[in-house]
Image (spheres, rainbow, N blue to C red):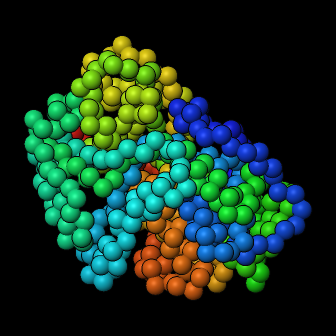
Amino acid sequence: MFTHKPSLDHAPSLYAATGLPQPERPALQGAIEADVCVIGAGYTGMSSALHLAEAGFKVVVLEAARVGWGASGRNGGQLVHSYSRDMDVIESRYGKQAAQTLGSMAFEGAQIIKERIERYNIDCHFKKGGVFAALTDKQVGHLENQQALWARFGHKDMTMHDAAESEKMTGSNRYKATLVDHSTGHVHPLRLAQGEALAFEQLGGQIYELSGVTKIDRGEPAVVHTAQGQVKARFVIVACNAYIGELEPRLASRSMPCGTQVIATEPLGDRFPEILPTDYCVEDCNFLLDYFRLSADRRLVYGGGVIYGAREPHHIESIIRPKLLKTYPQLKNVRIDYAWTGNFLLTLTRLPEVGRLAPNIYFSQGCSGHGVTFTHLIGRVLSEAIRGQSTRFDAFANLPSYPFPGGRVFRVPFTAIGAMYYDLRDKLGI
């Protein structure tokens, strides 16, 4: 499943240090059978598996490392609606019908997460409220357009705030305006994945960790192989995203792993009460955006930056601390307790790629930075397709997808050059 041998332990993050207790999950040994075999125990895999288990399917999940090991357990924890390309772009590229169908699902993922938290009593530190923050006049106009666009698709639980109100809300004077989405929020992302895994197991589902998939035999049933076992299944869901490696070269050729970095401060306690007094999460409107929030024990969790090709830097703090200090210069002497990186998967269109590798083998990948909510939506949609209700699945599957220019060799420099252009535009305010 991997082209290299990364550590199978969780990244040295705040999340790994404060995750939910988990049972021992042994590697798969021998041959077993299931209705559905899910490859990958991140959000896409666990959302799919949990929906299918609720519908009465016998489901087996195979994970090369640990539940939530990848982006699902390392991300910023922010529940952000829609897709990396919003409905206006979808409408202009693919037509009104595509925009209407995808728009009708654009706000569902966050609701699924909140339903899961409540139904299964998942202690993942959920807090309400998310903020989009504008640094330039152009970005203020973007937020006004976004509010109107989302209202057109039925989402109206948003409010605009001027610079003075934004400073009171965030504790930073950087922002010319903010748009608050009152229907979203933020979570401890690893605890969410782990809580979903526990819920799945309570319904009779099986998870095998340290069970990287080596190949998938097409057929009805399909056979999914690991180093020491195999699963014969009527259906397979490939849910590997940025960590698919060489398992399915066709999927790997149309996407690119990208790294993002996150740091967490020491607990702030009662110091700096001006920082995020609302306890909302924040992301700015830059192309290479920054995002931050307070953890349950009042650490500032701050992330940003993109490394195309997913190299793992050894100087994460030096990349992110200057960004943090631009937002909160008063934290100059605050200690950084955790620094980590993780990969998300980028597509050329910035829209997720969903489809079939065979009539009974499904896949979803390439959330392009909007993975927390989309993965939960697509888990429901994949479960619908396996149950014979494919209308919503087809809406995503019918979107075109393309390989990156330059192929797998030159996709990184070509994409990085494009990102530099948009980053420069952000800095110049144009």
Residue 334 locus on image (x, y percent): 38, 16
Residue 171 locus on image (x, y percent): 22, 29
Is residue 265 visible from the viewing direction of this image?
yes
Q: Disc count in the image?
A: 0
Q: Is residue 339 above or below residue 369?
A: above
Residue 242 locus on image (x, y percent): 56, 54
- In the image, what residue occupies the spot 53% across and 63% down? 365
Residue 351 locus on image (x, y percent): 41, 65
Q: Quadrant of the N terminus?
A: bottom right
**Position of 134 compared to 206: left or right?**
left
- In the image, what residue occupies the spot 37% across and 33% down? 294
Residue 348, image quadrant: bottom left
Q: Residue furthest top?
A: 333
Is residue 136 visible from the viewing direction of this image?
no
In the image, 106 versus 113, the foreground residue is 113
Q: Is residue 12 above or below residue 426?
A: above
Q: Residue furthest right?
A: 30
In the image, 408 versus 340, the foreground residue is 340
Residue 388, image quadrant: bottom right
- In the image, what residue occupies the spot 55% across and 74% down? 382
In the image, 67 versus 320, the foreground residue is 67
In the image, 97 versus 6, the foreground residue is 97
**Position of 34 compared to 176: left or right?**
right
Q: Is residue 274 above or below residue 271?
A: below
- In the image, what residue occupies the spot 73% across and 45% down? 23
**Position of 49 compared to 377: left or right?**
right
